Image (cartoon, rainbow, N blue to C red):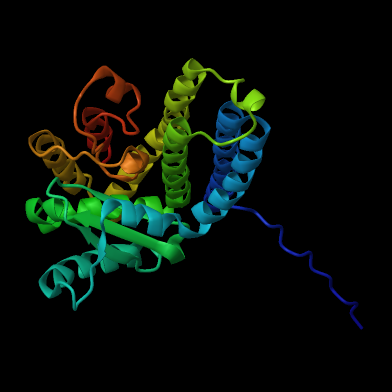
Amino acid sequence: MGGVVWKAAPLFCPGPTFYMHYHNGLKTAALLGLLSAIMLVCGQAFGGTRGLEYALGFALLTNFASYFFSDKIALAMSGAQPLTPESAPQVYSRIAPLVENIARRMNIPMPKLYVTPEPSPNAFATGRSPNHASVAFTAGILQLMDDNELSGVVAHELGHVLHRDILISSVAATIAAVITFAARMAFWFGMGGNRDERDRGSGVADLVMLIVGPIAAMIIQMAISRSREYSADAASAKYIGSPYPLIGALRKLDSYAHRIPMDANPATSHLYIMQPLAGGSVMMKLFSTHPSTEDRIRRLEQIR
């Protein structure tokens, strides 16, 4: 009689997708921690011990809301409305098949669709996972793009969904908006505390914190966004089968962004496929969350 043959259990060999999700999870945790620290510093500067206590509670609440409701907050800040067969039949019948087809190629669920009334052409994706993703299009991009170019934009945005970039981007958008709002409110109204505690910070310190808080959030956004745009561009070329739909779309977006500037909320600017903020000052370029259009097109042209 033969003995029992024991087979070793197959070793778990995580692939690139596992490492990408793990890495993005760590970055999300680090982002939440770092932006929370900024809140605590602002609270201490404005209100001393009591301000620090308020900021701690506010940071905990913000982290919870950022993780679970960041997509809804980002969509609300952009004025996005759901795109359904009932709300806009013709637009839906054009967009939904494009999105569904590319989502199927990427093996991810069909995201929810939204449209904003913004005349400047642009689009963004948001959500905490592929199962909770949304893609929003401005009215301007739907009028400007043909279906071929629009497919390149859709594939770019779904590339963010596939890579799970949208969690980090959405969390950054929410917390950056909260930091900006909290800094302004604290500057104008103060955060309480006794006289000795409030006297610790001078008017100059308050002004510095009002400026530093939002800038710190923008720096973090910049640090986490630029490389992901290249990856999403490459995903568009891969799943469409050609880089040229997105190349044509980027050229149009860059051209029309100057003709019809979009003064979006700075907290959500990194979500869009094209840097939406109006103006081309040195400061705006310094804090840009996107690579230049020329660099993006140059990289896409190298894909064969």
Q: Give the quarter of the figure containing the N terminus.
A: bottom right
Q: Residue furthest bottom?
A: 1
Q: Quadrant of residue 297?
A: top left
Asked if residue 240 shows in the view, the reply is no
- Image coordinates of residue 106 in percent, x first then y, are 37, 61
Asked if residue 161 shows in the view, the reply is yes
Q: Residue at 55%, 39% (x, y): give it.
A: 31
* 228 relative to 151 in the view: left or right: right
Report the front residue among 15 and 219: 219
- Image coordinates of residue 23 in percent, x first then y, are 57, 44
- Image coordinates of residue 136 in percent, x first then y, are 27, 57
State how many labels appear. Answer: 0
Q: Quadrant of residue 285?
A: top left
* 300 relative to 21 in the view: left or right: left
Q: Give the quarter of the figure containing the C terminus.
A: top left
- Image coordinates of residue 193 in percent, x first then y, are 63, 34
Report the front residue among 45 and 262: 45
Q: Residue at 59%, 40% (x, y): give it.
A: 55
* 59 relative to 270 in the view: left or right: right
Report the front residue among 11 and 69: 69
Q: Residue at 47%, 51% (x, y): give it.
A: 167
Vertical position of residue 203 compared to residue 132: above or below: above
